[in-house]
Image (cartoon, rainbow, N blue to C red):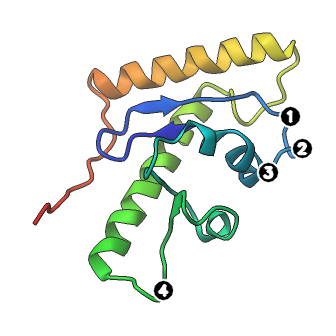
Amino acid sequence: MGLCIRTSDIIWIHGPFPAGKYPDITIFRHVMKNFLEPFKRVEANRGYKGKAPEFVKTNDPFCAKPEHDRIQGVVRARQEFVNERLKNYQCLNVHFRHSVEKNAACFRAVAVLVQLSIRNGEPIFPVEYNDH
């Protein structure tokens, strides 16, 4: 699942994948990077950069600026916050005992509920940008 950095909206869902069988980097390399527009990158941890540096923005200690590190930390925290909201519905931390198709439908339904809550009174904390 991916979030928009500016709005916190859920903008990408793909799966389901059996737990532990497909690491995040495998899903990114074989699926998500194919959905990126030219010159677009994702915010991710350093483990992704070595696999696809042209598609991944990370905390780079060689060119880090304190304000960039702060914003990147906030962006990552929002993703974790959305994951926590999904876990409130018990769809990420329990074994699903039905078909893969039903699992996908249930996860997408929960993602819609979380997105609606973000838009209607339970927003994710904002990221402040300084465009100059």
Q: Residue furthest bottom?
A: 62
Q: Which mark is residue 120?
A: none
Give the labeled residue for mark 1. Answer: 18
- Left or right: where 34 falls relative to 129: right
Disc 3 marks a residue whose amino acid type is Pro
Where does residue 60 sit, x and y in percent of width and height? 49, 79
Badge 2 density bin: few <14, some 14–19, many ≥20, Cα 10 Å: few
Q: Secondary structure at mark 1?
A: loop
Label 4 SS: loop
Q: Amino acid at mark 4?
A: Pro
Residue 102 lies in quadrant: top right
Image coordinates of residue 21 in percent, x first then y, are 89, 44
Cα gap from disc 4 to disc 1, whole angstroms: 34 Å
Which residue is labeled 2 in the image?
Answer: 21
Asked if the residue under mark 1 is in contact with the one under mark 2, i.e. CB atoms within 8 Å, the reply is yes
Front residue (pair 36, 106): 36
Which callout, 3 or 1, points at the residue further toward the start of the chain? 1
The tag earlier along the polypeptide, 4 or 2, is 2
Viewer-proximal residue, 40 or 73?
40
Tag 3 residue: 23
The span from disc 3 to disc 4 (Cα, nearest Å) is 25 Å
Q: Position of residue 104 (x, y in %)?
A: 72, 18
Identify the residue position indicated by label 4 in the image. Answer: 61
How far apart marks 4 and 2 lie (CA) works out to 31 Å
